[in-house]
Every structure is written in structure tokens, then in C-alpha cells.
Image (cartoon, grey):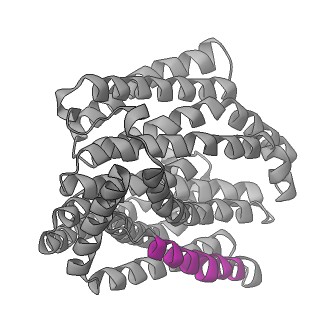
Amino acid sequence: MEQFGLACALDTLCGQAYGAQEYQKLGTYTYSAMVFLIPICVPISILWIFMDKILVLAGQDPQIADVACKYSIWLIPALLASAILRPLIQYLQSQSFVLPMFLSSFATLCFHVPICYVLIYKVDLGNTGAALAINLSYLFNVIILVLYVRYSSSCEKTRTLFVKDINFSCIKEFFHFALPSALMVCLEWWSFEILILLSGLLPDSKLETSVLSICLTISSLHYYVPFGIGAAASIRVSNELGAGHPQAARLSVYVVMVLAIAEAVIVATTLYCCRYLLGYAFSNERGVVNYVAELVPLLSISVTMDSLQAVLSGVARGSGWQHIGAYVNLGAYYLVGIPLAAVLCFTLDLRGKGLWIGILLGATVQAIALAVITFFMNWKKQAITARERIFDTTSSADN
């Protein structure tokens, strides 16, 4: 997740460079991202190696912590592959090359399912087999995309030679957006991880953790739909700002917001109507199913907020104001959401329901804040800033 957040800086840089027709900058920014992300793997790997001790200090079951640690250690090669994969995805995405990414992902899925089955059940490696399957799948995806970028005529204008074209100014520019991008993404996702950790401190922790994990899984699966819409928003907004078309960027925001609202209404209504059946997709225990049904009304509101904030976050990445998004997420989740969740859960004894209400209020604050900022955005100024950024960096590189 940290690497994904850092790579989101390319939503701004590559998208605006492509809109400004500074095609050679896309390759340079992408290579700069790889150079930056690969060393980041070292501290993350160290953190994963000592994951068991960290989880035990956080009050988690030692046996669960040990399994999580072993799984994380075996997953380290995927972390290295991700340092190359994430920039490649953002590079292609900024040019609207969606079909190659879809085909690559589909091929990776077709590769992953059988290899995962073989390693887990036939070779009997269990969790270790699952981690190895992810490693191989990430590597498989990287190889496909590298070959496409290297040999496809579609990338001829934007690919560059690594040694020749990479420069310090581009790495510095990438870092300028990468840090707030990572904070923007991680602050949000970490809040949900904290939610699960807090549920582990409840008296009936097995039930509470199971139900919250189910709700979080449903929410996460849904999130990829508005996130995709947000990615489209990021592409269109960054391309139009880079091209100097502020009104087109504004229109793109209106279009994706309509799509997000429509998607949210459909999904929220479907979840609510299926609330008594939803739990059976994850468990046969009556207590778990009933508890899930009790939380689904809150989950329906939650997916609505997710749809709005995911799209607005995409607009933020395309516009280049990730630093504002980071402040919004910090305030929404860590000054509002998590403290309220703790109070509702432990002080008012609402338990898992209180945790979800708290995080829902945080997401609501986040969505409202991002909506207000977007509504009052000076798009003409954003377009001028985008073009100045791209051409100033180009001039610095030439000098």
C-alpha cells in the first residue's frame, strides 16, 4: 500500500506531462519512480521481518502474529516486483492505455489461480504457498508489461532510455508529490487496519473480528469500482490541466461525480436488500450472519461515502493537491473517525457496531471536505500551475 501511494505521484506528473505533449517526460518520471521505490523496499522488509513482535506489542494473539510474520517474510519478493509494477501501471494509465493493463491483469489472474492452488493444496505449503503464488504472479505481470512497453509502437513516443534520461530534478519532483500521495492513501487504509486491531481487544474478539473483517472485505471489494472511476477522473483531469484546458477538467469532474453517485446508489441498495443473505457468503454460523445483517445498513452508507471520496481523491491526484488530501484524511480519520470509534466501542459499549459508526463518520467528513475543496477549486490557476511545473522541470533537465 505504501508503494501504491508513492506511485500515485505519477498520476499528477505523467498525466499532466502527457496532456502538455511533453511525451519524453513520461518515461523519465516512470524510471525516477522506480529508482525511488526500490530502496523503499528495504525499511518495509525490515518492518515485515519483525511483524510478529509488533503485533504482539499491539495486543494481538501470538500465534496469529507468528503466522502473519511468516507470510509477510515470504511476500518480500512481491514487494520488490511491486516497485517496478506500480510505476508501469501509472505510466500506461496516464496515457489511457487501459486494454493492455486489462489483458495483462487477466493473464496474471489465469496464471495465479492454478499456481496458487498447486502450491497451497498439491505441494501443501499452506500460507507460504499463497505468498509464493503472489510473488510469481507479480513477476509474471511485470514481465508482460515490460515487454509491452519495450516493443509496443504505442509507447514509442513516451519510453526513454534509463541511463540517458533520468535526472535528479525529476526524482526531486517525484518525491515532492510521492510523500503526500503516500500519506493520503496510507492514512485512509491504516485507519481500517486500526479498526481490526481494536476489534481484537473486545471480549468476544473472535466474533467481532470476524464480522468486521467480512464488512471490510465487502467494502474493499466494492472500493475498486469507484477507485476505477477515480482513476479515470485522475487521467482526464491531469491530461486536461496539462493541456491547458481548465473547463474540460471541470467538466470531467462533473461527469465522474454523476457516475459515482449512480454506482453508489445501485450498490448500497443491493447490499441493503440482500442484508439477511450476505453473511452466508462468508460463514455458516448463525451469530455471524445475524451480526453482519445488523451492520449492513451502516455498510450501505459506508460504500456510498467510499464512492464519493474515491472519485474525489482521484481528482485530487490528477490536480496535484495530494498534500491537501493528506491533511483532510489525517483530520477525518485520526481526529474524528478513530477517536469516535474508540469512544462508541469501549465507552458506550457499542462494540463492533460502534467501531464501524466511528470510521463511517470519518469517511463522511473526508468526503464532505474533499467535495467542498473541489467545488471551490480555481481550475484556471490549476492549469497554469500544471503547465509551469512540466515546462520548468523540462528546462531544468535541459540545463
Asked whether residue 277 appears in the rendered view, the answer is no
Over which residues does the magenta segment extend?
Answer: 323-344
Residue 87: quadrant of the picture: top left
Residue 335 sits above or below residue 161 on the image? below
Determine whether, in the image, residue 54 is placed left or right of residue 175.
right
Residue 200 sits above or below residue 40 on the image? below
Residue 292 among those drawn in magenta: no
Determine whether, in the image, residue 300 is placed left or right of residue 54.
left
The residue at the far top in this view is 122
Tag count: 0
Residue 150: quadrant of the picture: top left
The residue drawn where x is 23% and y is 34% is 155
Give the image location of residue 122, x and y in percent: 61, 12
The residue at the far front in this view is 399
Of residues 231 and 70, the one nearer the viewer is 231
The residue drawn where x is 52% and y is 80% is 361
User: For the stretch drawn in magenta, what is the main secondary structure?
Assistant: helix
Of residues 337 and 202, the one nearer the viewer is 337
Give the image location of residue 184, x and y in percent: 51, 66
Residue 251 sits above or below residue 35 on the image? below
Residue 195 sits above or below residue 344 on the image? above
Give the image location of residue 276, x and y in percent: 46, 59
Give the image location of residue 24, x and y in percent: 27, 43
The residue drawn where x is 30% and y is 30% is 149
Determine whether, in the image, residue 73 is placed left or right of residue 247.
right
Residue 333 among those drawn in magenta: yes
Of residues 326 and 55, the one nearer the viewer is 326
Determine whether, in the image, residue 73 is placed left or right of residue 167.
right
Residue 60: quadrant of the picture: bottom right
Of residues 175 and 220, the one nearer the viewer is 175
